[in-house]
Each structure stands twice: as C-alpha cells, then as structure tokens.
Amino acid sequence: MDKRKVIMAYRRGFITIQECAQILGIDSTQVMGMVNDLKADPSRIYPQPVNG
C-alpha cells in the first residue's frame, strides 16, 4: 500500500498510529517521526510532478 495513503488515513483519523505502523511495517515511534518530518517538508512524501 502507498505510504502516502496510509499516513493520510492516520492524519484524517481513519486509523490509529498503531494500525498505521503495522501497515507500514515499522514501529509507531518511527511513524510519528515520519509524520513530524512531513509537517516540516511535505515534498518528502508528496513529490512535485515532473512536467514534460
């Protein structure tokens, strides 16, 4: 499953942090780090489209 969709589901409240971590196959503390990183730099998970 796409990481972006899983994280967005967590951020929208559809799944818990534990469910998010389980789907991604990582620890819940790592998920929190990813979420915090994305707040600082959203392009890390939402890459800019390439024109061409």
Image (cartoon, rainbow, N blue to C red):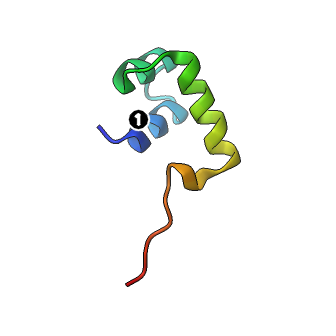
Which one is nearer the viewer's eye here, 52 or 20? 52
Task: Tell me: 39 left or right of 4.
Answer: right
* Image-quadrant location for residue 23: top left
* Image-quadrant location for residue 49: bottom left
| Residue 40 in the image, given as x and y percentages of width and height | 70, 46
**Farthest residue, direction bottom:** 52
| Residue 29 in the image, given as x and y percentages of width and height | 58, 17
Going 37% across and 84% down the picture, which residue do you hit?
52
Going 50% across and 66% down the picture, which residue do you hit?
48
In the figure, 45 relative to 30: above or below?
A: below
Which one is nearer the viewer's eye here, 5 or 43? 43
Task: Tell me: 22 left or right of 10.
Answer: left
Report the residue marked by disc 1: 6
Which one is nearer the viewer's eye here, 11 or 25? 25
Going 64% across and 39% down the picture, which residue do you hit?
37
The quadrant of the picture occupied by the N terminus is top left
**Farthest residue, direction right:** 40
| Residue 4 in the image, given as x and y percentages of width and height | 43, 44
| Residue 17 in the image, given as x and y percentages of width and height | 51, 20
Name the secondary structure under disc 1.
helix
In the figure, 18 relative to 36: above or below?
A: above
Count of marks overlaid on the render: 1
In the figure, 5 relative to 31: above or below?
A: below
| Amino acid under disc 1 | Val
- Rate crowding at label 1 as few (under 14), some (14 to 19) or many (20 or more) other CA atoms within 10 Å: some
